[in-house]
Amino acid sequence: MATIEQAIAAFSRQVDALESGIHAEQRRAKVYNPADRAYPLAARAMRERWDNLRQSIRRLHRELAAVRLELNSGAKSQER
């Protein structure tokens, strides 16, 4: 369980760093719309990585919830 929590924390830090990088690239290029052809390639790549990390974080949260549920169910079974 601690490993999952550590992964979530590490991914969250990466997401924050990527957000800063994306905003910096957008400001530098003065293009904020990802659909714009002039949108910076670096920002596009960071946004894709950002999306992937956010999906991974959501999956890890679901996995963590399942582990906690299993641990709670096991503890209740042993109480009986």
Image (spheres, helix red, strand yellow):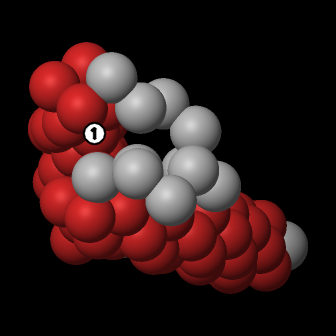
Q: As rendered, which of 77 and 63 lies closer to the eye? A: 63
Task: Using the image as rendered, state which of residue 13 and residue 27 is in the foreground.
Answer: 27
Residue position marked by numbered label 1 in the rendering:
22
Where in the figure is residue 63, as x and y percent of width and height?
59, 77
Nearer the observer, 67 or 15 = 15
Within-10-Å neighbours for mark 1: few <14, some 14–19, many 20+: many
Amino acid on which disc 1 is placed: Ile
6 or 25, nearer to the observer: 25
Residue 47 place in picture, x, y as percent: 40, 58
**SS at circle 1:** helix
x, y (%) of residue 51? 50, 64
Left or right of 56 in this view: 45: left
Does residue 54 appear to the left or right of 44 in the view shown?
A: right
**6 with respect to 48 (left or right):** left
Q: Quadrant of residue 11?
A: bottom left
* Residue 42 drawn above or below residue 13: below
| 74 versus 42 height, above or below | below
Q: Residue furthest front?
A: 38
Residue depicted at x 64% and y 55%: 35
Residue 52, picture quadrant: bottom left
Question: What residue do we see at 56% from left, 70% from top?
Answer: 55
Q: Taking the image as drawn, is residue 57 in sight?
A: no
In the image, what residue occupies the spot 19% across and 60% down? 42
Name the quadrant of the C terminus.
bottom right
Where, by quadrant of the figure, is residue 6 drawn?
bottom left
Residue that appears at 24% across and 32% down: 29
Decide if residue 25 is on the left or right side of residue 64. Answer: left
